[in-house]
Amino acid sequence: MGIPCHRATFSVDMSNVYLLHGAGAGHESVFLQAFKHELEVLLNATVTPITLSYMKEIEKTGKKRPPPRLPKLVTEVGESIDAQAPVVLIGKSMGGRIIAELCQTHDVKVCVALGFPFYPAKKEDKHRLENLQNSNGVPYLVCQGTRDSLGAVEWVTNQVLPSNVKLHWIEGADHDFHVLKRYNRSQVLVIKELAKVSADFIANHETNS
């Protein structure tokens, strides 16, 4: 049974919890807004969203554009966070890659990835396991749908992941955590599960750090 998050004593200032968006959708997305709300209730803390510059431009102009290369994004996020302050980092998709890299330069205590993009669609040979290997031993939870086209259960479970990386599978979910009708689960329920699993992981590792 998980630790009741609202009763836990945290070693990290819980004002230092940050949420990063994915490549295609920012914090205006219904998914991220709902997840943020659920997690804040469970942690009894504010989760601070970080919007990358290219996404701000997309939201301003309404014109889609690809993100810059990962090193530039890592630098941008790194410069917005105090490198000396203990932090909890959460990332959706591409954001999960960014937070893994920040473990090398910042005092990251816990990471949570929502749908880690293990590889580009249908290109398993171009995998991104190196990002997880760069997570520097920081407790790192990956919440992944079993139907994720960027990291399906059949492929991921055959990889050797760093020992600090833990997996939580959402049965029948795709990369955006939409679940097939036959599983009889709404995305609202899926988001609640993601928030609960994330909050428990953060609480368990914070009280043990």
Image (cartoon, rainbow, N blue to C red):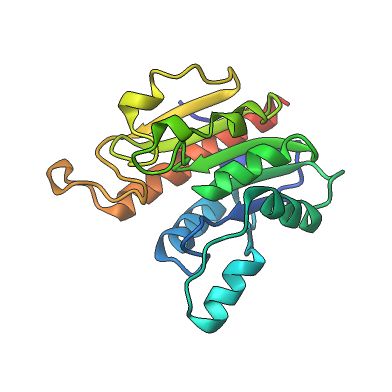
Q: For the point 34% across and 48% down, which residue is it? A: 177
Residue occupying the point 70% across, 54% down: 72
* Residue 149 placement, left or right of 159: left
Give left or right: position of 106 versus 57: right
Q: Residue at image x 49%, y 34%?
A: 142
Total count of labels: 0
Return the residue nearer the eye: 181 or 206. 181
Residue drawn at x 56%, y 39% as measured from the top left: 112
Q: Residue furthest right?
A: 84
Above or below, comparing residue 60 to residue 128 in the picture: below
Measured as percent of width and height from the top left, residue 171 is found at 27, 35
* Residue 41 vertical placement versus 174 (above, below): below
From where the camera sits, is residue 8 visible? no
Decide which of 179, 101 is in the foreground and name it: 101
Q: Position of residue 33 (x, y in %)?
A: 48, 63
Residue nearest the viewer, comparing 152 with 66:
66
Quadrant location, the N terminus? top left
Q: Is residue 135 left or right of residue 193?
A: right
Q: Quadrant of the C terminus?
A: top right
Where residue 159 sits: x, y (%)? 45, 19
Residue 76 visible (yes or no): yes
- Residue 104: percent from the left, percent from the top? 76, 34
